Amino acid sequence: SLGALDASSIAGVPGSSDEKLALNRPGIKQEKWSSILLQVSIPFFLAGVGTIGAGIVLGRVEKWRVFKEITELFILVPSLLGLKGNLDMCLASRLSTQVNLGNMTSRKEVVRMIVGNIALVQVQATVASFLVAMFAIAVGAIMDGTFHFEHVMLLSASAMFTATSSCFVLDFVLVAVILLSEKFHLNPDNLATPLAASIGDVVSISILSFIASILFDHIKTHLWITFVIVACYLILLPMWVAIVLKNKYTRPVLKSGWVPVLSALCISGLGGLVLDASVEIFSGFVVFQPIINGIGGNLVSVQASKISTMLHQSSIIGIIPPHTKIFEWPWKALFKGVPYAKTARILLGMSIPGNIVFVLVADYIHMSKSTVTIAFVLSFLMASLIQVMLLLYIAHVIVHAMWKWKIDPDNSSIPYLTALGDLLGSSLLAVAFFFLLSINQEYGSELNELNASN
């Protein structure tokens, strides 16, 4: 959630009254484009490494016996990663806004904010991960026509353990980044939100894979272990709820923050269905799916957080500032016309070289040599650009609409946006793979032909 932008770097109509009004508002911080680029690019590429790692790990574990026997895990992955990202990014956005508003000066209040927010994330992670597991089980039962109780317990225990443990660790990392950002006078929106978007994906997939594999190996003889894991989290739940309810910063979120999180789970679940279907058809799909989803969620979370902070700084909730409106022309929202367009241009520009690098590196690590074709890179870039442009425009609409309806976008916008990013990313990537298949340029085709000839 950012401050405003300096007049020399706004890409709108020069000297327009709306832009001058936006920039001259008291309390709005101004950032140069070079400052935004520098601060966003470092965590962006670090997070990109995380998405590559997530894709590589998923490409390895898809061959594990547990993933072969319990295919619902593929439905679970996008929803679980989306949940973790949503909860952590909302925490980062809330705390970043408080920093930008100058509300984190008292050490006592800072500690209270941190404890309350971490407890809130644990409550949401426990409940939502259990619901994610139920969704995956229900969809799997409908598609396969079979139901196994031991699979229910394995998925529930694995999902709850993965979500709560990964969120708990990453939340402390985010808090440290935000506090250091404030100390060194950097905008935490540019640092914390991108890191939260995808750096934990590789950790989450690794935890999910290992815990699911371990439980699967002992499920026939030690099913009680899954009951113990689920019971422990249910016992801890009232303690986390009590902490949240006693905290003035998080009490309102506990009551109102469920709709976006649960709605986002349903949207991400549709992305999981796309992944589950595509894994059966396309070689290498699981390697690149976390990349396109992670980068899309990364970039749109930055934009949503920045728009949210500017609204907090330039207006009161319920009133749209005069320099913008809910529905802008896409050109104005993304390229030239409103104060946020500068950041949108920077993010779009970063996505092109970033995706090229990430695709080449992921392919080389996965295949142990470079196998991607120009057609594959161009198809991936097109899918990614369409996804990011749609997400950035949807972010403009959703954040302003929530502000108009007196809903704090820091708590509600990012879950919808990242979930839509998962669904759009998986769907557009599937379209790209289908296109490559139609022109006989599918990923790994050269390697398959070489193996066939041998």
Image: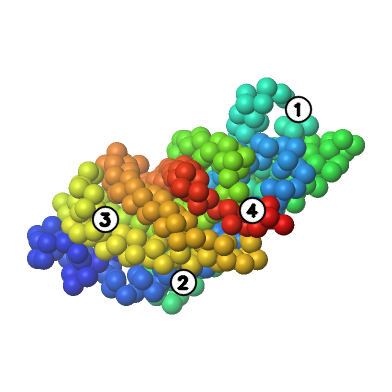
Eyeballing the image, is 416 above or below 169?
A: above
Instruction: Give the labeled residue for mark 3.
Output: 334
Percent coordinates x, y for residue 101 in the rendering:
35, 62
Residue situated in front as seen by the camera: 321 or 70 = 70
Secondary structure beneath disc 1? loop
Which residue is rendered at x = 53% and y = 61% of the image? 372
Residue 186 visible (yes or no): yes
Instruction: Give the labeled residue for mark 1.
Output: 148
Eyeballing the image, is 142 above or below 61?
A: above
Which residue is rendered at x = 53% and y = 47% of the image? 82
Percent coordinates x, y for residue 44 in the rendering:
46, 65
Q: Label 4 vs label 2: CA separation?
A: 37 Å
The N terminus: image quadrant: bottom left
Mark 4: amino acid: Asn
Instruction: Give the labeled residue for mark 4.
Output: 448
Q: Label 1 vs label 3: CA separation?
A: 48 Å
* Earlier-in-chain disc, 4 versus 2: 2
The C terminus: image quadrant: bottom right
